[in-house]
Each structure stands twice: as structure tokens, then as C-alpha cells.
Amino acid sequence: MPDFVRWPSFPFEGAMRVKPLAAPVEVEPPRSGEDAADCIACGTPDDSYIWVSERWRVRAMDRPTGLPMVLILECRSHLDLGDLPNLLAAELGVMTVRLERAIRSLDGVARVHVNRWGDGAAHLHMWFLARPQGRLQLRGTFLSLWDDILPVIPEHQWRENLAMVAAWLAEFGGTAIAEPPHIQWESPSTITFAGSTVEAPAEHSAERPTDLGNAEPAQTIAAESGAQTPDSPNGNEPTTASTATSTQP
């Protein structure tokens, strides 16, 4: 077995064996979306992304992940990495740095791994994977494997992180699509003190607004003052991207 199976970051233990190496093929099979007419990325609308601009788009997975954040940067044009004209090649460097900084600004993120495989889909897509702060066992090349092993983060935190990254990118241009989770208003009917139950006063029993847009000005001020601010790496290309707004952020 190679030495990396003894690295602290290797996700598995116990008896293992190396698979036999298959014979090379004479002609490699086409990747998904070799023809722009069949390309999933080209056919996906902007509202399936968390941020979009004239030449670039950023999408997320369709559900929360084990890592704090996993995002994909795509160019709008149906091009692969080596096909980029000078303008897009230069912008790719800027967008890579900008998105890395946005993800690294999230609480609990120590590092951001940037990867490009390109064996599953023909349309250029760069992967950005956030390593959690303090999780030294996740350092290095096996981070994408750990993403499928770790328990997923809470959905409200995932959606809030998506909205924060989208807003960060929008400060430099483009449009943020993802929105933070909306406050869920509730109207308690009783108040409990040390085992006893007391009926709430009648004037407070009316149902609260479902969103701030339905509140009276005075209610809005009170609400704002008390509210809390809130192709996969392993070989399977994602079929569609999720947004923070598609299932709600």
C-alpha cells in the first residue's frame, strides 16, 4: 500500500487492497456536455445559482454538505480551461481569489481548497471546498472524500453561509441570488414559570406577521431591534445546482 494510507488525513483504516489497473482504452468516451446543446451548465437558468454576473456564475450543491461550504465557479461561455481567451483567463484568476476570500470570511473556515478535475463535464467548473477550523485531520488532498463522510451542517447555517458569500461577491459586481433564511414568527399562547402555566395577555395573543413586510412600522422597529442576525470531486458530476432561494434561501 502507498504511504498515504498511514497519513493522519487518510479517511479509512483496516484491511485494504489496491484495485487491479484496467487496460487503457483506445478512444476515451465523451464527457457530459461536450456539445453545448446538451450541456447542463449552459441550460441551467440564473435562479439556480447563488451569484451571477455577465461572464461568471457560482452555484452550490442541492443540499447541505459535510464541509462548511462547497461551491462551483463556472464561466457562462461554453469553454474548457484551455479554451479561455485572454480576457476570461485573466478574470478567472481574479474570480478565484475573490471567491476564496469570500468563503474564507465565513465563521469556522480555516482554509479553502481550489480544485479543477474536468473529467466528468466539458464546461469549465472550478471547485471550492472549505476546511473547518481546527479539523487538522481534514488537511490536504483527502478533503473531498471527507465531505461525503462528515455529518451535514444544519440547513439554516448552510443557507446563511450561501447568502453571505453571494453578498460578498455582489460587493464587487454581479447579482446575489441567494438570500438568508427568513425569520419564522411564532405566537406563544402560554408562558411557563417554574412548572406553572400562565395564559398570555389577550393583547399579545394575536398571530404575529409571517414576514416583516406585513408588519406595522412600530412592529417592524421592535422586530428589528430584537431579531438575531443570523461533477462531484469524487467522480460524479452534479446534475443541477441549488440556490439558497430554490427551496426556501
Image: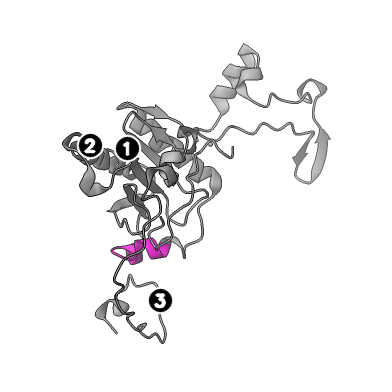
In this view, 104 is above or below 200: below
- State the residue position of label 3: 12
Percent coordinates x, y for residue 88 in the rendering? 22, 36
Quarter of the figure that contains the N terminus? bottom left
Looking at the rendering, which quadrant does residue 113 occupy?
Answer: bottom left
Foreground of the two, 100 or 36: 36
Query: Between 144 and 137, which is closer to the camera in this rendering?
Result: 144
Name the dominant secondary structure of the magenta segment. helix
Q: What span is in magenta?
A: 136-146
Q: Quadrant of residue 136?
A: bottom left
x and y percentages locating residue 47 in the rendered image? 49, 33
The residue under label 2 is 88
Residue in the image at 50% along x and 41% along y: 159
Which residue in the protein does label 1 denote?
77
Q: Residues within 10 Å of mark 3 (few under 14, many from 20)?
A: few
Going from the N terminus, do you reach mark 3 or mark 1 first?
A: 3
